[in-house]
Image (cartoon, helix red, strand yellow):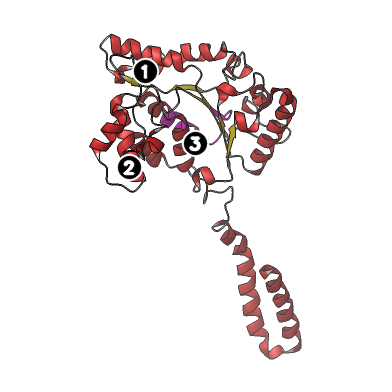
Amino acid sequence: MRLTCWLVFAGCVSVTAAIEPISTSIAVGMAAALTGFLASYQNVLYYFHECCRPEWISYNKTGLKYDLDTKLYGQHVAAQVILKAVTGFMKNENPKKPLVLSLHGWTGTGKNFVSQLIAENLYVKGMSSSFVHLFTATAHFPHEIHIDTYKSQLQEWVRGNVSNCPRSMFIFDEMDKMHPGLIDSIKPYLDFYDNLNGVSYRQAIFIFLSNAGGENIVQVALDFWKDGREREEIQLKDLETALSLSVFNNKNSGFWHTSLIDKNLVDFFVPFLPLEYKHIIQCGLAEMVTKGHAPDKKVVETMASELNYFPKEERVFSMQGCKVIPSRLDFYV
């Protein structure tokens, strides 16, 4: 409406100038100002309304590294892989395919949190960005009988959003509850294509979150602990191959016999290790600050001591991780 008013005003200035030559210089000045305003009008809007532009989408490597180092507890392998993968992808001005990450581990180990950190260091509005799309298996694809409909919808959602902004991020949560075959519907968008029907997907990011493979990760962590080796000695090579195979052969993984794995379209299988007691303490202290309380280690230790750990006697690894801490902590503060 305001833009229309300016255009009408511009027409009035032009007519007035033709009738009253004495005000020509004033009219010309106003017309020039108006032309400059209209030229910059769209750019001004970019600062107030989220657009697929650098003002709203800009990778902050320093910020992501800081967040992974200071806010993610007990996940040295995941932190290293995520930082290198995202940084390498964002540095590449002409990637051959989208970045595809598959995060695996037990509930409460930090998979959702890491997705949030990536979004916060890429989009000004973080997870609230209109270019970040979260799909949850039980909410968006609940009924197996409708799988063909879901496939069509998923293809349209991805195609439409990437057409709107090539630098889109898609997060698929609860992959272990995804109906087998559904995720294969977007396989072409994750492959090595310049474009499909005029749409290029090569700048997009796809992140899959799953509890599948968690048992393999836990077993490796237990073996290291039983052998008296430090947790920090665990490397990606100790986990990735076994993890990808277990997910591929697990009918309840969402990746069962999927072409995404068969065709090597998943760039990294990222393992999230089971958390230890000390990590639960760190999560608890951080949560107290988030809730506006002064961190009190005694309170957090009381809470942490009443959680479940395994092996039963040694109580080394937490069974719930950090996910239950926000609600549990309320009982002790």
Residue at disc 3, secondary structure: helix
Residue 15 marker: none
What separation in Å lies between label 1 and label 3 (alpha carbons)? Answer: 24 Å
Residue 90 marker: 3
Q: Quadrant of the C terminus?
A: top left
Q: Which amino acid lies under the numbered mark 1 shown in the image of this protein?
A: Gln
- The residue that mark 2 highlights is 288
Q: Is residue 268 left or right of residue 314?
A: right
Q: Which amino acid lies under the numbered mark 2 shown in the image of this protein?
A: Met
Which of marks 1 and 2 precedes in the sequence? Answer: 1
| Number of marks present in the image shown | 3
**Residue in the foreground of this view, choosing between 131 and 252:** 252
Mark 2 surroundings: few (<14), some (14-19) or many (≥20) residues within 10 A = many
Which of marks 3 and 1 precedes in the sequence? Answer: 3
Residue 235 marker: 1
Q: Is residue 248 left or right of residue 303?
A: right
Q: Are marks 1 and 3 in contact (CB under 8 Å)?
A: no
Q: Which amino acid lies under the numbered mark 3 shown in the image of this protein?
A: Met
What separation in Å lies between label 2 and label 3 (alpha carbons)? Answer: 34 Å
Q: Is residue 88 left or right of residue 276?
A: right
Q: Position of residue 96 (x, y in %)?
A: 58, 28
In magenta, the rendered stretch is 82-100
Q: Position of residue 225 (x, y in %)?
A: 29, 13
